[in-house]
Image: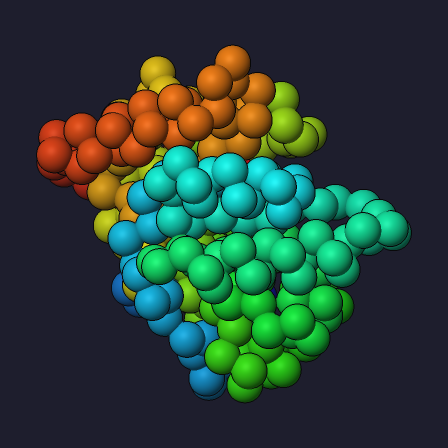
Amino acid sequence: MASHDTFPQEQAAVAALQAAGYGAADARVLAYLEATGRFPEHAGQRSAAFAPLQYPALGVYAVVDSAAWVGRVLAAGIRTVQLRIKDPLAPTLAVQVEQAIALARATPGAQLFINDHWQLALQLGAYGVHLGQEDLDAVDLDALCQAGVRLGLSTHSYTEVARAVAVRPSYIACGPVFATQSKDMPWIPQGLDNLRYWAALLPVPVVGIAGIGVGNMAQVAAQGVAGAAVITAITQAANPEQACRDLMAAFARGQGARVSGVPLRARPTL
C-alpha cells in the first residue's frame, strides 16, 4: 500500500481498530476506507482495467486438477471452471491446459480460468487466469490485460482486497468462507456476514471460496455473490455429476432467498 500522510483522526481510528482485533495493516486500510469511501492507492495501481467477464453470473465455480475433470463438470452443466494444477513441472501441464481450453471453447457459455500458470495460459490463448496474492509480484499484468485475458484474484483480508482492487481484475474471490482442508489456511474463516459485506462493497463480481458444499451452498449464494467455488464437493463425491446438479440447484435456491442488510465492516480474519 502506498504511504499517505496520516492525520490525528485517522491515527485514532487505526488505534481503535487495532484494539478491536484488526492487524496493523488491515486497520490502516479500513480506517482510510471509512474516512474517504475508497481504498488507499497501492504501488501496483493500474489505470487500465481487465476485461469484464462475458458471463458475470458465475454460479457454481468448479476447481479441478485435470482436463478430464474440466470435461466432466462442463458435461454436467457447470459453466465456470478453474484448472488448478499446482505442480509447474507436471509433464502433461501444457497438454492439460490446451485440452481444457479446447473443451471450454466448445461449450457455449463456459468460462475457464487457469490457476497460476499465466505464461502458459497467455501463450495458449486462455479465456482467464486466476492468481493468488503471492503471484502478483511476478506476473506481467500488462501482457495479460492487453491480450484480453480475464483475471481473478484471491483475497483474505482488507489489505489483500485493497491490493486486488488496485489491479482492477475481472472478479475477486473472498475466503476462506468456511474452514477447509484443501490447502493451509492461516486466516480466520470469513463466514457469511463477511462474504455479504464484500459482495456489496466491491466493484467487480465476488466469488466465495473454501469449505463450500451442497449443505451450505444455498446460504453462500444468498449473500449476493456472483459465484461459489467448490473442489472436494465435486471431486470427492460418490457421484460427481449428481453433485454438480445438486450444487447448481442449491445455488439457484440461495439466489432466490437473498439475505438483506449489509454489515458495516468485515470481521478481522488474521
**Number of numbered discs on residues:** 0
Residue 236 image offset from top left, x and y in percent: 57, 20
Front in this rendered view, residue 241 or 113: 241
Using the rendered view, name the quadrant where residue 31 is placed: bottom left
| Residue 237 appears anywhere in the view | yes
Q: Residue at x 58, y 32 (%)?
A: 187
Residue 255 image offset from top left, x and y in percent: 18, 37
| Residue 202 appears anywhere in the view | no
Front in this rendered view, residue 53 or 162: 53
Image height of 54 relative to 223, above or below: below
Q: Quadrant of the C terminus?
A: top right
Residue 212 appears left or right of 251: right
Residue 120 image offset from top left, x and y in percent: 72, 67
Using the rendered view, name the quadrant where residue 98 is placed: bottom right
Residue 174 appears left or right of 129: left
Image height of 57 relative to 208, above or below: below
Residue 181 image offset from top left, x and y in percent: 62, 22
Q: How is the image coloured?
A: rainbow
Residue 62 appears left or right of 193: right
Q: Residue at x 71, y 45 (%)?
A: 85
Q: Residue at x 44, y 44 (%)?
A: 74
Q: Residue at x 81, y 46 (%)?
A: 87
Front in this rendered view, residue 85 or 243: 243
Q: Quadrant of the N terminus?
A: bottom right
